[in-house]
Image: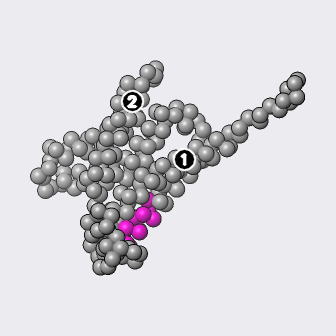
Amino acid sequence: MTDDGAQIAAPRSDSRASTRATGVVIVGMSVAVWWPAFTLGAWGTFFFDQLLTVWAASTGALLVVLFQPRGRPRVLKALALLVPSLWLALSFLFLESDDLLTVALDLLALLVALLGVPATIWVLARVMWPEFGEDIPRGRRVLVVVAVAIIGVAAFLLGMNQELFLTCGDFTISGNSEPPGCVPGAPS
């Protein structure tokens, strides 16, 4: 209470801020990871639009990191954000190749899709909300990684087993191609 009888608001608990920040990150990353993981399970591949979305977001974040008026260099963040551009550049150079390099490019594309999405979201969150990382203790960061990994694995398994709860009509009406093994039928 103050001298005039007004109540002083209690400071927000660091735990509440940390919980809220953790929840925001888990939801955001889960939303970004589920569709690429599902398509990998259902079709056995990532769609080009997913990979290019990761590239666009990573490139935008890279520009922010490079031109951010901060004293210390952000080399690790910049290198992480360059991975999708590296994949894209190598794809142009070796588009017609059917050798070991193609396998390496496919693995890099898998890395871009599975790791690039959450990494880009994490870096973007840190760029737009610098205190963000400070609000989440190391234990909660592990929780974020585990929760997003669980969502990714679950979405992949749902994609692999889409015929158990979706029909070919569900894919058609949503504007997607029918994955191998889908059950013929009208949308459910």
- Up-down: is 16 above or below 11? below
Give above or below for 9 relative to 52. above
Task: Identify the residue at image location x=28%, y=51%.
Answer: 49
Q: Looking at this view, is 168 or 121 the one in front?
A: 168
The quarter of the picture where residue 92 lies is top left
Quadrant, the C terminus: bottom left
Range of the magenta residues? Answer: 152-162
Image height of 44 relative to 90, above or below: below
Taking the image as shown, residue 90 lies to the left or right of residue 64, namely left
Image coords of residue 145 (percent x, y):
50, 51
Of the numbered discs in the image, which one, if any, rests on residue 64?
Answer: 2
**Where residue 52 appears, x then y in whole percent?**
28, 47
Give the structural element (helix, strand or loop) at label 2. helix
Q: Is residue 176 visible?
A: yes
- Tag 2 or tag 1, which sits nearer the N-term? 1
Circle 1 residues within 10 Å: few <14, some 14–19, many ≥20: some
Name the residue beneath numbered marker 1: 24
Q: Amino acid at mark 2?
A: Val
